[in-house]
Image (cartoon, coloured by chain):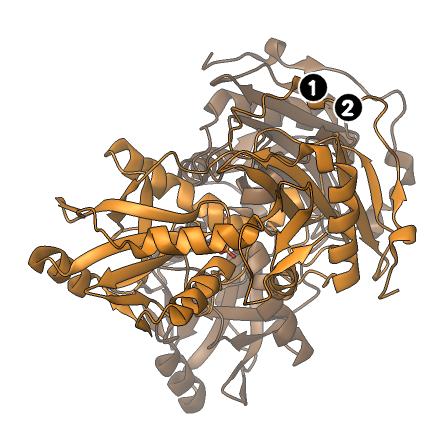
Chain colours: A brown, B orange
C-alpha cells in the first residue's frame, strides 16, 4: 500500500487537552509535547495504517533491536503559524527524502511520501493550538523510526515503528556560541553513516561536547577523522565561514549531513549576489584568517537553531574571537529565511508549504 | 549506593514458566528469552535497587532519548552448565569493565561492579533450568543500558535503564564463513566510537553486510576508513590471520573492540608456544599470502561465535579460498577455550567463574 488519504489515518483524540498547563512564553527546546502523536507500524514487509493517538508511553519488548543495535533515524522540522493562524512547513519533502536516505543506509524500510506528508498535516491540524507564535518559537516536529522487531542476532529487524511527535519550542541556543575545533574525537568515518540522521551519530558527540563544555565552549567543530585538518560540521549544524566577503561551506559527503538550512543559505546567498564557495575549508586557513582579520563571520546552520552565529573558536589552547560586523551575513540569512518560514515575506524559492 | 548484596535485588517470579514451550534441541541464536529479566533504573544521579521481574514489555515515553540520539550500550556474554549442573561464566568482570568503558564514551553513567555481577548471578540462578547443555549451545546473556530520559535536545539523557536478558542459544554461524574485504563502507572512525559496544556501530554494519550477502558472502571484513588497507574486524568479531605458523591479529585501538575472546586466544597461543604478532595486518600481505600459499588460516573471534573459521575471502572481484589445514589453530583455540568454558578442562588462566 504505497498511497494513503487522510481518511486512512485513524484518529483517537485526547479526552482533555494538556495545553492549559503549558507556559508558551517560556518554552524550552523540545521538552513539552503536544496532545497527540502519530504511530505507524511496519510488519510483514508492509506499512500498516497510521494512527493518531494521545501522546503517551509506548510498549516494546526488551529484545526490540532499537535497544541493542541502534537502528533508528529521525528528522527535525518546524511548523510556523502566521498572524492569520495559517500553518506553514519549510521544504518538508526534502525532510522526507532525507528520511528515506537515512533509512536505506540503516537497512530500514523506506516510508512512502504520503505517509510522511499526510501524517504531518493531519497531526498539525489536530494540534494546531499548540503551535507557538512568539518570535523565536515554533513547533518543532520530530518524525522518527526505530526497530521494534526482536532478537539478539546482529541483523536488521523485521518490524519498525514510524512516529511523529510535536514539541512547541523556544530557541535552541540562547545567543552566540563559542566553539572548539576538535582534534581528538571525530563524528564520522569515510564510508560511515555521518550523512544519515541516525541516533548513533548524536550519542557519539555527547562525550566530546561535554569535554568542550567543561572548558567553556558550547559546541564542537568537527574535523575529518584522518588529519583533523578540514572543518566539517558544528554539532548538529552545518558550518559556514565568511572570509572577506566570500561565504564558504564544505561540500556534503558521506560524512556530512546534507542540511536543508545549508542549501537554503546557499540559495539565498546567490539571490543576494554574495560570492559563495562550496569547497573544503581547512583549519589552517580559518586560523590564518582569524589572525589577519579577514575572518569576518562563522555560523552554524540547522533547523533547530536556524542560523547560529559563532562568537569565537578555540584551537590548540588558543581562543580566537570574532568581532561584530556591520553587514552580517548571518543576520541577513536568518531574516530572509525566517521571514519566509513565518510567512512574513514573499517566497521566491517555493519553499513554504501551507498545511 | 555503590555496593549491593543479593538481598537488595527484589524478585518477582513468573506465575508459570514458559520453559516447556522451548525446543532446546533446535535453538536459534538469541530469539528465545528466559522467564525473567533484571531491570535497574538510574534517576536523579543514582542507581536504584535492581529488580528481577517476569520477562515482558517495557514502557517508555516517545521522547525517551534512546529513540532519538542512540545512547545505548550492551555486552554479550555466555553462561555454561556442566554435567553436574554447575553454572559458569567466562571472564565476566572483563565484560563489566568494558561496559563501563562503553558507558563513559557514550556519556552514560557507569554501573557499579556489584550491580553487574550480583544481578547476573541472581538472574542465572533463578533461570538455571533455561541454560542449555547440548554441544554448541549456551545461555547467551545480554546486559544492556539505554537512555530512558526524555527530550529532543541533543544532549545526554538524565535517566537510564540497565537490564539483563537471557537467551538460550544455539550456534551463531552454521559452519565456515565466506567473507568480503570491504573497500567502500567502514565501521568506525579514528576518534569515533568503534571501541565502544554501542548500538550505532552495529546498525551501521547492516547495509554493507546485506550487500555482501547479496554477493554470496556471510560477513564483511572491515578495513580502515582512510585507505581500506588495514584489516581491522570481522563484523562483530575480532580477526586473526595465520601466515605460515605465525598467528597475527591487529592491535586494539579506538576503532576496534577490545574483544575478550581475542585476548583469550592470544593467551592460549602463548601457552601453546605459538608465535603471535599483534600488529597492523594489511590487505596486501593477506592477498599475497593467499596467492603464495602461506595463508594457512583466518578466523573471527567473539563471544557469540567463539572461533569462526573463514573458508575464503573476496577482494576486488576475486575470491580466494583457504585450504583445510591439519593442525588447525582455529580448532585448537576453540577446543581449549570451550573446554574451559564448559568446565571440561583445567583452567590455568583463572577465567572461569562459578555462579
Ligand atoms: C549533523 C547535522 N548537521 C546538520 C544539520 C542541519 O540540517 P537541517 O538544516 O536540515 O536541519 C543537522 C540537523 O539539524 C544535523 O543533525
Ligand atoms: C565489533 C566487535 N568486535 C569483536 C567482538 C568480540 O568481542 P568478545 O570476544 O569480547 O565477545 C565483538 C563482540 O562480540 C564485537 O561486537
Disc sitting over residue B20 in the figure: 1
Above or below A79: residue A119: above
Q: From this viewpoint, is residue B297 visible?
A: yes
Mark 2–mark 1 contact, CB under 8 Å?
yes
Above or below B121: residue A43: above
Badge 1: chain ID:
B
Disc sitting over residue B319 in the figure: none
Along the viewing direction, whichever of B272 and B175 lies nearer the viewer: B272
Q: CA distance from mark 2 to mark 1?
A: 7 Å
From the viewer's perspective, tell me whether residue A351 is left or right of residue A77.
left
Q: Residue farthest to the left?
A: B292
Q: Percent from the top left, x then y, of residue B1? A: 88, 64
Check the picture and name the quadrant holding the C terminus of chain A.
Answer: top right
- Identify the element where label 1 is drawn: helix
Q: Residue farthest to the top?
A: A7
Q: From this viewpoint, is residue A239 visible?
A: no
Q: Percent from the top left, x then y, of residue B46? A: 85, 61
Q: Residue at x 63, y 14 (%)?
A: A9
Amino acid at each position: 500500500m504505497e498511497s494513503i488519504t487522510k481518511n486512512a489515518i485513524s484518529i483517537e483524540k485526547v479526552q482533555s487537552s494538556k495545553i492549559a498547563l503549558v507556559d508558551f512564553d517560556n518554552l524550552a527546546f523540545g521538552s513539552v509535547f503536544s496532545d497527540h502523536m502519530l504511530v505507524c507500524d511496519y510488519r510483514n514487509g508492509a506499512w500498516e495504517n497510521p494512527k493518531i493517538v494521545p501522546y503517551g508511553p509506548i510498549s516494546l519488548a526488551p529484545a526490540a533491536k532499537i535497544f541493542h543495535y541502534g537502528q533508528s533515524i529521525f528528522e527535525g522540522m518546524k511548523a510556523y503559524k502566521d498572524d492569520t493562524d495559517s500553518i506553514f512547513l519549510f521544504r518538508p519533502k526534502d525532510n522526507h527524502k532525507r528520511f528515506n536516505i537515512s533509512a536505506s543506509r540503516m537497512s530500514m524500510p523506506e516510508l512512502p511520501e504520503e505517509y510522511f506528508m499526510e501524517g504531518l498535516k493531519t497531526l498539525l491540524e489536530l494540534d494546531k493550538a499548540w503551535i507557538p507564535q512568539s518570535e523565536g518559537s515554533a513547533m518543532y516536529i520530530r518524525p522518527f523510526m526505530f526497530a521494534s522487531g526482536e532478537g539478539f542476532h546482529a541483523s536488521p529487524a523485521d518490524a519498525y515503528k514510524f512516529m511523529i511527535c510535536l514539541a512547541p519550542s523556544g530557541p535552541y541556543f540562547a545567543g552566540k556560541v563559542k566553539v572548539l575545533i576538535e582534534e581528538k574525537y571525530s563524528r564520522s568515518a569515510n564510508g560511515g553513516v555521518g550523512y544519515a540522521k541516525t541516533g548513533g551519530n548524536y550519542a557519539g558527540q555527547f562525550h566530546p561536547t561535554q569535554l568542550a563544555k567543561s572548558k567553556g565552549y558550547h559546541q564542537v567543530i568537527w574535523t575529518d577523522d584522518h588529519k583533523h585538518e578540514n572543518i566539517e560540521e558544528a554539532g548538529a549544524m552545518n558550518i559556514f565561514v565568511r572570509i572577506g566577503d566570500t561565504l564558504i561551506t564544505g561540500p556534503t559527503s558521506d560524512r556530512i549531513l546534507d542540511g536543508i538550512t545549508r542549501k537554503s543559505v546557499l540559495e539565498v546567498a546567490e539571490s543576494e549576489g554574495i560570492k559563495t564557495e562550496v569547497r573544503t575549508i581547512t583549519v589552517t586557513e580559518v586560523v590564518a584568517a582569524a589572525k589577519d582579520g579577514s575572518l569576518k563571520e562563522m555560523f552554524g546552520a540547522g533547523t533547530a537553531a536556524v542560523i547560529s552565529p559563532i562568537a569565537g573558536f578555540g584551537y590548540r589552547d588558543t581562543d580566537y574571537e570574532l568581532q561584530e560586523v556591520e553587514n552580517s551575513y548571518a543576520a541577513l540569512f536568518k531574516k530572509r529565511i525566517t521571514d519566509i518560514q513565518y510567512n512574513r515575506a514573499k517566497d521566491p524559492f517555493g519553499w513554504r508549504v501551507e498545511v
